[in-house]
Image (spheres, rainbow, N blue to C red):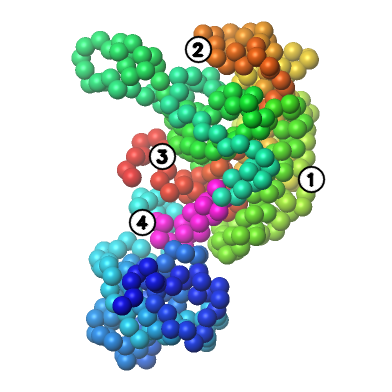
Amino acid sequence: MKTLFECSDVKVLLDKELSGATVFVCGWIRTIRKSKSLSFIELSDGTCFESLQIIYDESITDYPEVSKLAIGSAIIASGVMQKSEGAKQAVELKADEISLAGRSDADYPLQKKAHTLEYLREIAHLRCRTRTFSAMFRLRSLMIYAIHKFFQEEGFTCVSAPIITGSDCEGAGEVFKVTTLDLKSETFLDVRDDFFGQEAGLAVSGQMEAEALVAAFKKVYSFGPIFRAEKSNTRRHLAEFWMLEPEIAFAKIEDVIALIEKTVKYLITYALQHAASEIRFFDQYYEKDLLKKLEAIVSSDFGIITYTEAMELLKKADEDFVFKPEWGIALQTEHERYLTDKVFKKPVFVVHYPKEAKAFYMKLSADGKTVAATDLLFPGIGEIVGASEREDQYDILASRIGESGLKIQEYSWYLDLRKYGSVPHGGFGIGFERLLMYLTGIENIRDTIPFPRTPGKLEF
């Protein structure tokens, strides 16, 4: 007797276009169409984006029970693969036996073919069964693999940055606090009695730890979840998201920029080659000409402009900006979109930002006003990569920490790195979910991660 482990994967059956083979499959019913002579089941088993069409008629074993099957049910089916007469698939399964493995109740919420993304966010535990999120999360998995493949082949060492930390890398104060103290207690709480004996929080970045490790391994990268307690409900923000953070030693900002472009083009190319079905789906339903856009990115040279030059362009622009362009302010999304969508019409690096607009650890330029930092802006989405050369001089870094209002003693270990064999080094961070937005045309970042964490939302 066959076991469930002997079931054929739908991916294998469709890839090989088997015809005449007797097979045994299991999965979930995505749709059912019934007629007097034939009935059709669209079966998904999770092994690929495409579904397997199963056809059956009244000759099937236990037809009365099979005819009661509902959408969302799990089934086991056996029969013979044959060439399909339909245009949507090359082969299909002519079933001679179908049995119920897991019943789906009549109130299954995915009965309709189309639901709004807003509605699906309310049932995040079920939305992965839809075609949109099957495509998204499959692409997400492929991109995670591609990230590790690229950096391993480039000679990088993968490092694990801590999730619980005592420092705020960005100095912005948007940190989730971590404590074992009873916050409901009416007595005075002393942080010295807490688990770590000091204030602790969830990490907003793994960059500083990567800087420590790059001094031993020359090229490192970390990839994992980070957390920002920023109460923002925009389509571009999450409280918990994933960040790719490579760091390279013996490198200036120009080297970092070159690595960013190489990384981004590799990841897009990998998606085009290995997630063709998913990209075509997003091209059809979410962003017209998405495929052409991605192919154009891979084949183009990215633009580059200084922050000062960008401000001059923005001041001259015939645009009614909500935030008036002035030298010294951070670029807003509307400014970024103008530069990418109307001026360059392709990705563009903006370099040499005012030091006041960037973090304390960025390399101070000779002019004393700017830092060796860059943001990569993408058309239609804005900033997708933030990068800089790191300040490698002890005295300057200590001064910058003080100017930022931070406590030098909390960064003593970070300053140590500038005392023992410090060299020019730099790195960047890619917001993984924002990259997925660009790859798919999905407009809300909450639809790029299985269980989004946003202000006031923690149901799943």
Reading the image, the residue beneath label 2 is: 410
Q: Main secondary structure of the magenta part?
A: helix
Badge 2: residue crowd in 10 Å (few <14, some 14–19, many ≥20): few
Which of discs 2 and 1 lies nearer the camera? The answer is 2
Reading the image, the residue beneath label 3 is: 453
Q: Which sits earlier in the primary sequence, circle 4 or circle 2? A: 4
Q: In the image, which residues are magenta?
A: 126-144
Residue type (three-letter) at the residue carrying disc 3: Arg
Task: Name the spot of residue 369 as percent of width and height, x first.
Answer: 73, 15
Q: How much space separates mark 1 and mark 4, taking CA atoms?
A: 41 Å
Label pair 1/4, CB-CB below 8 angstroms: no
* Horizontal side, residue 395 vs residue 162: left or right: right
Reading the image, the residue beneath label 1 is: 301
Q: How much space separates mark 2 and mark 1, taking CA atoms?
A: 41 Å
Label pair 2/3, CB-CB below 8 angstroms: no
Q: Find numbered disc 4 in the image and state the secondary structure of the residue it sits on.
A: loop
Q: How much space separates mark 4 and mark 2, taking CA atoms?
A: 44 Å
Q: Find numbered disc 1 in the image and state the secondary structure of the residue it sits on.
A: loop
